[in-house]
Amino acid sequence: MARYTGPSCRLCRRQNMELYLKGERCYTDKCAIKRRNYPPGQHGQLRTKLSDYGVQLREKQKVRRIYGILEKQFRGYFEEADRMRGVTGENLLSLLERRLDNVVYRLGFAASRTEARILVRHCHFTLNGRKVNIPSIQCKVGDVIELREKSRKIACVNDSMEAVVRRGLPQWLELNKDACKGVVKALPQREDITLPIQEQLVVELYSK
C-alpha cells in the first residue's frame, strides 16, 4: 500500500496552515506552524507570488494531505464525483468524508486520520458487525461502526475519546461513547464540512 512516510509537520508548513495531521500535538506550542511559520526548505522565507494554476494546485495538494490520499487515488475520487449527479466539488468532499478511516476519526476514536487508518488496518473496528481492515471503504447511511471489545483498552483510543469534545461531532454522525459505537445518520452535506477547503479550485484544476 503506497503511503506518505515523510514528516507530517513539513506538509503543514508547506500549506502555511494547520492541517492537524499529528492529533493533539497540533493544539500545543510544539506545533510546527507556531514555531516556524514559513514554508520548509532553504528558500522558504522568500516571498513568492502564485499563479492561478499554482493556487489551484496548492488547494488540491491541501485536500489530498488533509485526507492522507496519494495522487492516483485522489484523481479516482474526482472522476467518480464527476460522474455523480449534483455539484462535483461537493460530491468529492462527500466521498472523502465517507471513507471509513475519516469516519473513525470524526467519531473520535483516533486523534488523527493517520492513526485512524492504522487502527482500521489492524482490524480494531467492525462495520455492521463484520470485521474490516480497508480504510477506504465508503460508509453509507445506516452503517454502524463499532470498536471491537478487545480493543477498548487501547490507550490512544481512550485518550482520543476524551478529546472528541474539542473537535466536535458532525451532525451526520451519531456516537454512543459507552458502547464505543457510531452510526452514519445521513450523507455529509457541504455545510457539515467546516474544513477551510475551496473545492471549486480543485474542480477547475482537473477540468483543464
Image (cartoon, rainbow, N blue to C red):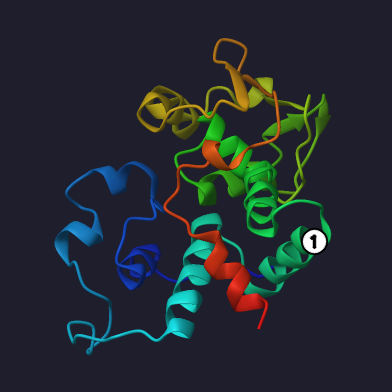
**Residue 38 placement: quadrant:** bottom left
Answer whether residue 172 is visible to the viewer in this image. Answer: yes
Left or right of 171, for residue 99: right
Q: Is residue 4 visible?
A: no
- Quadrant in the picture for residue 47: bottom left
For label 1, the SS is: helix
Q: Is residue 144 above or below residue 84?
A: above
Q: Nearer the viewer, residue 188 or 121?
A: 188
In this picture, is 48 found above or below 185? below
Q: Quadrant of the C terminus?
A: bottom right
Label 1 belongs to which residue?
80
Identify the residue at image location x=68%, y=43%. 98
Q: Position of residue 79 (x, y in %)?
A: 77, 67
- Closer-to-camera residue (149/26): 26
Residue beneath the point at 77% across and 44% down: 138
**For the N terminus, which image quadrant?**
bottom right
Q: State the residue lying farthest toward the front.
A: 86
Across and down, in percent, residue 113 comes to 53, 48
Taking 152 as reference, is 148 left or right?
right
Mark 1 crowdedness (10 Å alpha carbons): few <14, some 14-19, many ≥20: some
> Is 49 left, or right, of 110 in this rendering?
left
Q: Which residue type does callout 1 highlight?
A: Glu
For the image, the number of numbered tags is 1
Residue shown at 35%/84% (left/top)?
A: 50
- Residue 89 percent coordinates (x, y): 63, 58
Residue 180 rendering spot, x and y as whole percentages? 60, 18
Looking at the image, which residue is at 44% across and 82% down?
Answer: 52
